[in-house]
Image (cartoon, rainbow, N blue to C red):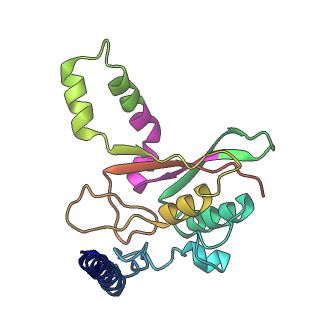
Amino acid sequence: MRRTRLLSVLLGALACAGLVALAATTATPAPQKFDFYSGGPYHAGVPKPSDILGYEPGTFHTTWGNMERVLDAIQRARPERVKREPFGRTVESRERSLFIVSAPENLAKLDAIRAGNEKLADPRGVSQGEIDKLTRELPVTVWLNYSIPTATSASSPGSTRTARGTPSTGRSSSSARSPGASAAGARTTSSIPTATRSP
């Protein structure tokens, strides 16, 4: 009886060891490196953040000043598609601004787009006919907030990569376009408040 019990324990231990060894040999492969820009095409004149910084965003801490260098370069590359609007200062006296990306025709009527969105946000006193017209004619507005506390470092790589471009898919005239996208799309306007981090 003692021998049977000992044999059972040994066989159980061997089975467990075999399962552990099998699990180790069939481990999940390492994830593939994510390519942020694989969905292009992009406008050739718009630099990648890594072209300006000398490293891939997220692999090294990006200071506020370097983030601004990237955003300024993107704006210089496609000034017809990017508008910067200051809206205040940080406690460190740095300018805060919106980095607005859209088709030139949307940037030209930005005040009208804002007024229409304000009516939709509070439709009291707005006729159903006007609401229907606004929802049909206004471009989609997307607000991406990269203005986060100074102790967090994700806003710079996120904002600079996003500002460089959301790739165009070519499937629809209403797909989002950015300064880095190769074709102009008139149905989306994006606002990116710039980060307010310490250098």
Q: Is residue 123 magenta?
A: no
Q: Residue at x 37, y 72 (%)?
A: 182
Q: Residue furthest top?
A: 125
Q: Answer above or below: position of 41 versus 105.
A: below
* Quadrant of the frame with the N terminus: bottom left
Relative image position of residue 46 (x, y in whole percent): 51, 73
Q: Residue furthest right?
A: 92
Question: Residue 40's image quarter?
Answer: bottom left
Q: Answer above or below: position of 83 versus 26.
A: above
Q: In terms of depth relative to the viewer, which is nearer, 4 or 68?
A: 4
Which region shows up in magenta? 97-114
Q: In terms of depth relative to the viewer, which is nearer, 23 or 18?
A: 18
Q: Residue at x 22, y 31 (%)?
A: 133
Q: Answer above or below: position of 149 versus 47.
A: above
Q: Residue at x 30, y 40 (%)?
A: 138
Q: Is residue 112 magenta?
A: yes
Q: Residue at x 62, y 68 (%)?
A: 73
